[in-house]
Image (spheres, rainbow, N blue to C red):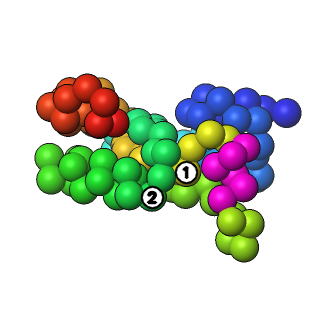
Amino acid sequence: MEICPNCGMGSHDQGFCLECGVKLGSVPETQDDHSDSEPDRELRTRAVYKAPDEISAITVHKILESEGIPAWIQSIQIPWYDGIMKMVEGYWGKVIVFEDQEETARRVIEEYFRDLGPGLH
């Protein structure tokens, strides 16, 4: 089984990681390829925050967006199973950003929680 270099999971289907969507392996470039020097940015993402609940995920998502950092929420919950995945994994979902924004996003999240003060996160 091939391990994804982006998220570390082993699941894949037709050259793409089923967990995070990154393209696995290398695809040779052809002469007809109109790609620029920058690889597909949309396929390189990182989870920067594991949210304990939906409200926390939405809050961090909005904070990152207010700083100009594109972000998405990925819930790990399964419909009709009433939060069982939260008990299994220990968190509700993840906030995800582009790989090149990871350091900035982590810094923004850290500053936000530091400004909240002790005991509020």
Q: Is residue 47 left or right of residue 107?
A: right
Amino acid type at circle 1 is Trp
Q: Is residue 64 left or right of residue 37?
A: left
Q: Quadrant of the N terminus?
A: top right
> Residue farthest to the right?
1
Q: Amino acid at mark 2?
A: Glu
At which x and y percent is residue 94?
49, 47
Q: Say which element carries label 2.
A: helix
Where residue 106 appears, as percent x and y from the top left, is 30, 30
Label pair 2/1, CB-CB below 8 angstroms: yes
Identify the residue at horizontal 68%, vertical 71% (top origin).
79
Span shown in magenta: 83-88
In which image quadrant can residue 102 be found? top left
- Report if residue 34 is visible in the image: no
Query: Main SS type for the magenta part?
Result: helix
Q: In this figure, which residue is indicated by the disc labeled 2? A: 54
Labelled disc at residue 22: none
> How far apart are the two marked residues, 2 and 1, measured between alpha carbons?
7 Å
Which residue is tagged 1? 92
Q: Above or below — where is 117 with respect to 11?
A: above
Q: Is residue 61 magenta?
A: no
In the rendered view, tell whether residue 63 sits above or below residue 112.
below
- Dot 2: few (<14), some (14–19), or many (≥20) neighbours within 10 Å? some
Tell me the crowding category of disc 1: few under 14, some 14 to 19, or many 20 or more residues within 10 angstroms, Cα based: many
Labels 2 and 1: the sequence-earlier one: 2
* 87 in relation to 83, above or below: above
The residue under the point 46% across, 45% down is 51
Q: Nearer the viewer, residue 95 or 58?
A: 58
